[in-house]
Amino acid sequence: MIIIHVVKPLPRLVHAALAARLRVMPAVVVTGARQTGKSTLAERLTPGERRYRSLDDLDVLDAARRDPEALVGGREPVTLDEVQRAPDLLLAVKRAIDRDRVPGRFLLTGSANLLLMKQVSESLAGRASYLTLWPMTPGEQRGEGRSGVWDALLAADDSDWLDVLAARPDEPQDWRALALRGGFPTPALALRTAAERAVWFDGYVRTYLERDLQDLAAISALPDFRRLMRAACLRLGQLLNQTELARDVALPQPTVHRWLNLLETSYLLVRLPAYSVNRTKRLIKSPKLYWGDTGVALHLGGIDEPGGAHLENLVLSDLLAWRDARLERAELGYWRTTIGEEVDFVIEAGGKLLPIEVKAGPRPRLADAAHLRTFREEYGAKARAALLLHTGTTLEWIAPDVLAAPWWKVL
């Protein structure tokens, strides 16, 4: 028997951003993978002040398809949950907004990226603000409602970074345990054992394949789709070569391309683009493959012991949550040259570049910073100092322009 420990909902990073957008826009759309906590977030924001309708309720879904105008009618604020199940409902929302443009009138949530769905013909352009709710960051799981200290690092002078991080609590954490439980609230907070989490992850994947996926596309070959998911999980942190992946799973390349797009639309798959500008070195343009949640990736891949790519994935997940909760746009990418020089992550914000390398080892060495220093030489004054994140306790400048820091001091 699985015992689920009841945990009080913890504050989420996007809460303030969502409240601010509802004060300005007539509609706010919160999307993210199923079970990231979208419904809980919406209910906690304005308890009892909004009508709540979930399209997971078959009666509500039928109403959304038969008479969407009645479902969105009236001036009372309304929350519509899982709107990807009836994409045409957005047309009724658009017409309601055009008749009466009241800030905060509609809060829409969905378990798919509506802007990537072919079935969605209405984007609510000029009428809606979009937010993404990613799985819980380490800071959210600790009840702090935050992501890593990326804003603090960007705001400080490079020379002050050591002081910024030294002021953080000196509490080492087990990154492997964090990767195994992932960031979905139930397995991360309410389930205590690996066996319990395995049951939850298995049910999550089964529900996605047998129901949620069918809302996006008609796929009958579910065993083939699951095999592709597993193969993608085993390529975490690697360059995405769709031709090679198709050969390995014995599927046509166009099918692999379409199914990867579905996984990305569902927020299960993340394709990290290459950072590039017109410089002397030709950069590889293929994206790198990551997963939306490390717990799901490890379960699907049948992996009991996380590796360095999973630590990279944890850092990326935190960066994605941070990026999508802030008003000032930041871009994320990786950097790689044709001769194999590579930097795991590059933050582009405020006209500057912050390169980050992640090492799953406790003792950072100067050799680990070689590609970070090459990146800084390449981009000159545009590049900030570099971060080398590792699993030990060392917090020091291992080079004049590279700060080695424990990952848990940053996340």
Image: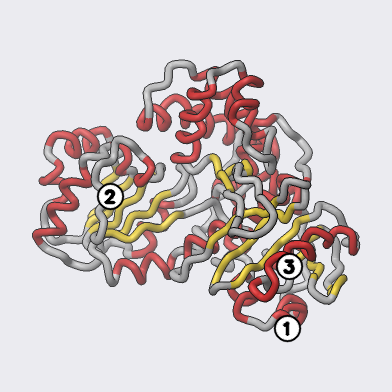
Which tag, 3 or 2, sits closer to the chain's start? Answer: 2
Q: In this view, which residue lies farthest toward the left?
A: 99
Which tag, 2 or 1, sits closer to the chain's start? Answer: 2
Q: Under tag 3, what secondary structure?
A: helix
Q: Which quarter of the rendered picture does the N terminus lie within?
A: top right
Rate crowding at label 2 as few (under 14), some (14 to 19) or many (20 or more) other CA atoms within 10 Å. some
Q: Under tag 2, what secondary structure?
A: loop
Where residue 269 appears, as percent x and y from the top left, is 55, 40
In the rendered structure, which amino acid carries the disc numbered 1? Asp
Where is mark 1, residue-wise? 160
Name the quadrant containing residue 55: top left
Q: Residue at x 83, y 72 (%)?
A: 395
Where is mark 3, residue-wise? 376
Horizontal relation, residue 309 to residue 18: left or right = right
Rate crowding at label 1 as few (under 14), some (14 to 19) or many (20 or more) other CA atoms within 10 Å. few
- Spatial CA span between label 2 and label 1: 43 Å
Q: Name the mark nearer the viewer: 3 or 2.
A: 3
Residues at circles 2 and 1 in contact by the CB criterion of under 8 Å: no
- Considering only vertical position in the picture, is 323 above or below 157? above
Where is mark 2, residue-wise? 123
Name the quadrant containing residue 231: top right
Residue placed most toward the observer, 173 or 290: 290
Q: Residue at x 77, y 78 (%)?
A: 162
Where residue 103 appears, as percent x and y from the top left, is 22, 68
Rate crowding at label 3 as few (under 14), some (14 to 19) or many (20 or more) other CA atoms within 10 Å. many
Q: In this view, which residue lies farthest toward the front?
A: 280
